[in-house]
Image (spheres, helix red, strand yellow):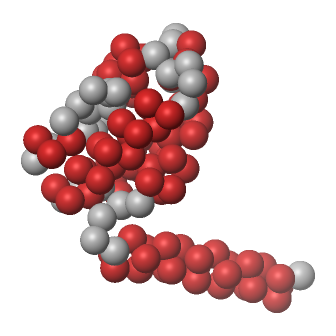
């Protein structure tokens, strides 16, 4: 049983390390990452109310993964593309999400934002 635990911990460490390295080697955050972070927010984005704890956690993870201007601009474009592509997303809910989660994302979440203006 002890070897299973060591193996599991080592595997978790390796996966985490690979994810950190992959995030720093690329030029900017990828839309697949943005989508993964915000997948728990879909119910809120469509229906409003109060965002779930996993949704707000994903927003915090997105903020941490997009600290620099190129990352923020890429994340902005991913958010804009998702807002326009996924049926039923209400733009006002998207705009209010960071405030409701208490996260200053530095990136507006809207169907109409100009992502090149993000600093």
Where residue 79 appears, x then y in whole percent? 38, 39
Q: Is residue 92 above or below residue 84?
A: above
Q: Which residue occupies 37% across, 14% down? A: 92
Q: Which residue occupies 33% across, 31% down? A: 109
Q: Is residue 29 above or below residue 23?
A: above
The answer, for residue 18, to whether it is visible in the render is: yes
Q: Is residue 39 above or below residue 74?
A: above
Q: Which residue occupies 28% across, 71% down? A: 27
Where residue 22 appears, x then y in whole percent? 43, 76
In the rendered image, which quarter contains the N terminus?
Answer: bottom right
Q: Going by the picture, which residue comes out furthest to the front?
A: 85
The answer, for residue 52, to whether it is visible in the render is: no
Q: Quadrant of residue 24?
A: bottom left
Which one is in front, 82 or 8? Answer: 82
- Asked if residue 73 lies left or right of residue 26, the reply is left
Where residue 103 appears, x then y in whole percent? 31, 34
Where residue 48 appears, x then y in whole percent? 51, 13
The number of discs equals 0
Which one is in front, 4 or 69? Answer: 69
Q: Which residue occupies 46% across, 16% down? A: 90
- Asked if residue 38 lies left or right of residue 78, the reply is right
Q: Is residue 14 above or below residue 109?
A: below
Q: Quadrant of residue 100?
A: top left
């Amino acid at each position: 049983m002890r070897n299973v635990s060591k193996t599991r911990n080592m595997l978790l460490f390796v996966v985490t390390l690979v994810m950190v390295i992959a995030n720093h080697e690329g030029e900017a955050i990828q839309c697949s990452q943005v989508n993964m972070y915000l997948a728990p927010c879909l119910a809120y984005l469509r229906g409003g109310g109060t965002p779930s704890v996993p949704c707000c956690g994903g927003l915090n993870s997105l903020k941490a993964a997009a600290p620099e201007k190129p990352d923020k601009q890429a994340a902005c474009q991913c958010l804009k593309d998702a807002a326009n592509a996924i049926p039923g997303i209400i733009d006002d809910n998207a705009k209010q999400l960071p405030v409701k989660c208490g996260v200053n994302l530095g990136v507006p979440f809207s169907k109409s934002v100009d992502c090149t203006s993000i600093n």
